[in-house]
Amino acid sequence: MASKEATVYIVDQGSSTGECHNGRVENDLDFGMRYIWDKIAETMIANRTTAGVGVIGFRTDATENELAESDPDAYSNISVMKPLGPMEMSHLKDLQHRIQPSDTDTGDAVSAIVVGIQLIEKFTTLKTGKPGKFARKIILLTDGQGVLEDDDIDPIAARINELDIELVIVGIDFDDAEYGFIEKDKSSVKERNEKILKALADKCSKGIFGTVEEAIADLSIPRVKTFRPYSTFKGQLSLGDAIRYPETAFRIDVDRYFRVKAAKPVSASSFVVQQPGSQQATRDAAEMPEDLSAVKNARAYKINDPSAPGGKKDVDREELAKGYEYGRTAIPISEAEENVTKLETFSSFEIVGFIPNDKYEKFLNLGESGITIAQRTNPKAVMALSSFIHALHELDSYAVARIVVKDGKDPQLLLLAPSIEPDLEALIDIPLPFAEDVRVYRFPPLDRVITTSGATLTKHRYLPSDELEDAMSNFVNNMDISKFGRDDDDNPTEYMPIEDTYSPVVHRISQAIRRRGVQPNEAVTPPAEVLIKYSVPPPELISQSGPALQNLIDAADVKKGTPHPHIPLIPYPNTNPPPPVPPKTKGKRSRASPPKPLSGLDVESLLTHPKKFKLTTVNTIPTFKQLLAAADSPSLISPAATQMGSVIHELITRSLGDQFYEQALENLSVLREQMIEFEEPGVYNEYIRDLKGRLLKGELGEGRKDLWFRIMRERRLGLIDRETAPASEVGEEEAAEFYSMRLQTGLPSRAKE
Amino acid sequence: MAERQFKTEEEEEEEEEFDETDYKAQKDAVLFAIDVSSTMLTPPPESDSKKADRDSGTLAALKCAYQIMQQRIISNPRDMMGVLLFGTEESRFQQEDASNRGGLAYPHCYVLTDLDVPAVEDVKVLREMVEDDSESKKLLVPSKESVSISNLLFCANQIFTTKAPNFGSRRLFIITDNDNPHVDDKNTRSQAAVRAKDLYDLGVIIELFPISRPNHDFDRAKFYDDIIYRDPNEGEELALRPTTFKSTGTDGVSLLNNLISDINSKQVAKRAIFSNLPFEIGPGFKISVTGYNILQKQAPSRSSFIYLDGEKAQIAIGETTKMAEDTARTVDKVEIKKAYKFGGGTVLFTPEEQKELRNFGPPVLRIVGFKPQSMLPDWASVHKSTFIFPSEEDYVGSTRVFAALWQKLLKDKKMGVAWYISRKNASPQLVAILPSDEKLDEFTGGQVIPQGLWLYPLPFADDIRPTPECPKPIVAPDNLVDEMRKVIQQLQLPKAMYDPGKYPNPSLQWHYKILQAIALEEELPDAPEDKTIPRYRQIDKRAGEYVNKWGVILDQQSQIYEAGRKTSIKREHDDSEEGPKKKAKVSRATAGLEGMNTDDLRAAIAKGSLNKFTVTDLKDWLHSKGLNSSGKKADLVERIEQWVENA
């Protein structure tokens, strides 16, 4: 919650905390600090200036606190190491440096709490003298080995309650029967101290007492960020037209909130390393590591202009009108008419109709759900909505409603489902798709096979046999997890309820940032166990359903197909990394079955075998492919490729501006793909090197450098490396270098005056 | 729409990383080839029925192309479309090549609109063909000699080669009623087959939309099976039943609707968002599946900047360059480091570390277990679902296993629960695997929902928002619920289901309708057609009686409740002084505008005393009537006066 906070950490740094106990190799202080650092990091990652953090050490060598000035005895060896206020990186570094086991065992934990109370009181009192609205908290970490005065426990507890402070006491190796930790051979001092501190915590209305072991174990459970309810609509849920039919319409005052809202991982900002000698005048040094500079976006606009160099001209934003695209037509819209394409809407929430809930398919849900409740201060509305919710529930029905959350916003259709709980009656809403949101893709049926002649088959290798159906049914029943979990009382319950699943990305990134903030030199660790718990079925379930699975595998008789090259879905992404190129494991392309039309007609025999056919710019690609297909000796491949090369040259030479570039590029990509297929990477590599020279030297016409840029950057038609085609002489590195090579003169210069 | 532009660049950049739009980048080009012959131009036999089909085959095809072009401008604004007539007396090839090759290269082929991203002019051309009879008649004259199909195919070849060389998906839609164009000429048949093979090698897929005549059923085997190849992207033997269309001229589905429905289902190139994803049903037991985005929220195109000083208005292309803040130096993408804000400072990760943090293993869909579908609560909705279908490529036998799983889930109303990483470095999700049974369109019989499985994203604990704090619910008394139940029973949607097809997005449609009207210099339409607006008259007619009764009961019951509460409040108030004061305040406020009936209001208007109310009062009143409550005070007053006048 985004309210103001004042949290004071009180850390026991007595010399005894330098010891290691209970088989640990790190000392007690470091062990306990794991909890404190993580807590502090959690505050820091939120980047909120309203979250005040203070740190007090006790049993420190020094004494640094205001109370000691008047009462040096009671408050000795207590140091305020960081006053309450926002926690910054520099503070963290300072504290990490200073929080170390001291050389003393003097210093009273309860006195340190009093110092903490005083810090909080001062920090949270407003100028008016009244206490401000803060979440106040003291967290005490101690090993319980120091000397404690327990005389003033009662008044201190009273003061803590008066100030509404939450007191958390975590002890290193404190006994906690509930958690299941009991320390053997405990010293009598520690035993007594634990009792005193427990008594103190018990006296506080918001007191928590526990062992640090449990606190640390809890750290690995992701903490879900809490939000305040966010209202998305305030108004009336209505049925009918209250203006035209006032007697037969109803309106209920309601409030609508988010019910589900996707959590996003913390987002990163962009920085660059500063150029040496750059000015730092405007930067706040504390804001950023010294050598980084923020990255800003600048937007420039270009238009096509055949008369300009490169065919493009820069234009100022001021010169441009606003408008929209309709197909490839630009439609300017004057400022006065700016909203002409906007549908005029008024805030409303209206019921369209009702459907039985078994007639709705959940996979049509379009996104995040909302929740609607009746206006809280309006009992009539609460009662009215209740009757609506109960009626829906009794009829097993959903409502369909149209909502406009604010005047001028786009209408959205919602599905309304009743939700009845003892303490909350509400309507759950889900956004529904419009006609345009559903694409019509047709798929063949799964329960029958239709042959090309139109006959319907019910037995086919694509259809499961009875045996496979039984095996699958048995397997699914065996893998049922609806009662596989165990609740607190060890009763069977749902496994993997939504409340127990944490977003792996959100928490992994958050954990990594906190870790790195505290330990900058530690490497990134694998995801925490709890985040990937549900990436596999539970082991007991696997072993239990083993026979059913084996049965299924046998009945299914699935065979691993030939390794399928991952074909990039975007044919030519101009983004990094380069698209994976199909690795060919087969030898020379085997033309076992040339493609045939539906009738099975042998088209090959009709083709005029074009062994000496000359490639032209007309019908290039089909002819080239047919040439290669007909080539009965590898010696014929290179000449075909040479012809293709000439066609590409011709297209480039003839091109006015970029007129034939697309065609040339397409031919080039077919050439590359075919040379990979026919295992002649050398032919292509030689050609592309040659083409580069010609383009950059202007042999195929002036100003063809931008074409080279497109070949490399946009289409990535560089050298074929050994990984792509084993016969290639070019290594992966060389190929990469060919790409990354700066085109010294290649880039069309931006600043053309 | 305005808001969309105000998204900061930073946000956009962040989104880019996860956006699926990357995967839509594969562009699609569709060329319609429409047969113009005497039979294609013959309207169906006369019929008395009002719904009877009046369109000839050619006209239906043109109407269909016209509608689909407008549709594609909205749904696929980057894709190309063209219309080619064949069998016409006139010939025309692409305009720019007309000079050097002349129309004679492809006799009786007439390029009506170039293959390109449609422009307003193209829409206009089609509209004229469809609407203006005299204009279309001039062009729609069948040639005396028959057109050579090989010529048509080669013409299409040239169009695709020059206009859409690098498109990932290129399709030729042939609409004809002639199942045997070269009956006796073996040679021309062979030529057509060869030209068809060329198209296949070029990567162009031919889709046939055959039209049967009343006395003649189209037979693909006669000719077209020689020129049509199976779409290599489709499963090898899994086929959809081929469709033929018949214009009967009688009642029922018109040829046009049939054509539109079928072409619609094919006009969107099936774009997979991932292919051959390993689907691990049990440890060590995998099949492969391909995923499709059947659901995709469509929004109006963003506004752009337009350059008007040239010959023709054109869209200015925006380019973002990144600059270092301190020196305004342009920086290269590789130089950029990502850092997180932390306690006023930053925490840095190298790009490799960044990547590692998002790496949860290779793409996979892995079953964790199964649950009954009833365990999926209504509120657990966070993203749209993805449709998956088996692919035989990596694992032979995937289809039958997938089908068995689908059957079981459907029959027992169960769902799979799975761990899902859709592609490399994508965030892992937990999904429910839900089965869908086939749903057909009631009129055309076309498939609306296919058989298959859906990956339904489950929310994480992090996505759940707290429910608002509420006082203890006031459960409605039975007689009130009973009355509401009647209301609900009266107002079932048609067929008792939600059919998205019946509800076009009103703001999207309006946006494009206005743009089209501006572009075609038509008069702007007055009022949008908004099918999402409830049908008030029907509601009044069918449920009015019950709503009214419900209202009466509600008044009684809430009075009873209020009476009960007041006595209990009174008792409480004996101890506290604050209560009654507050109460008085509330009642004074409500005695204002809200307490007035229509006659009071009329009187107030006559006296001109509406102005005395505060803006808040006026707004509250308007709001309570479900009226627009924005604007200046004068507007608000005027709106109330208007209402009173109409009351």
Image (cartoon, coloured by chain):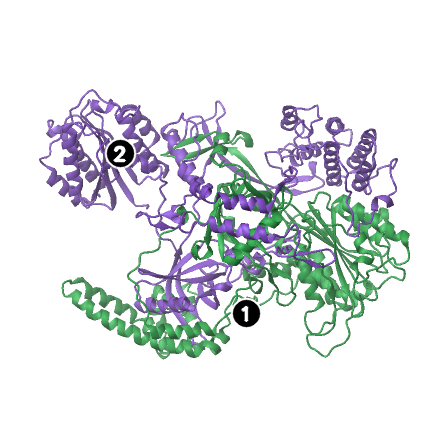
Look at chain B in the picture and name its colour: green
Element type at mark 1: helix
> Would you say residue B296 is visible in this rendering?
no
- Give the crowd class for mark 1: few <14, some 14-19, many >=20 residues within 10 Å: few
In this rendering, would A692 be left or right of B455?
right
User: Are marks 2 and 1 in one subunit?
Assistant: no
> Would you say residue B287 is visible in this rendering?
yes
Choose between A330 and B173: the one closer to the eye.
Answer: B173
**Point 71% across, 42% down: residue:** B166
Look at the numbered discs 2 and 1 and tell me whether their residues touch, using CB distance below 8 Å: no
Residue found at the very far left of the displayed protein: A151
Q: Amino acid at mark 2?
A: Val
User: Which residue is label 1 attached to?
Assistant: B495
Residue A364, relative to residue A21: is it above or below? below
Q: Amino acid at mark 1?
A: Lys
Residue A317, relative to residue A256: is it above or below? above
Q: Point out which mark residue A212 bears.
A: 2
In this rendering, would B1 be left or right of A648?
left
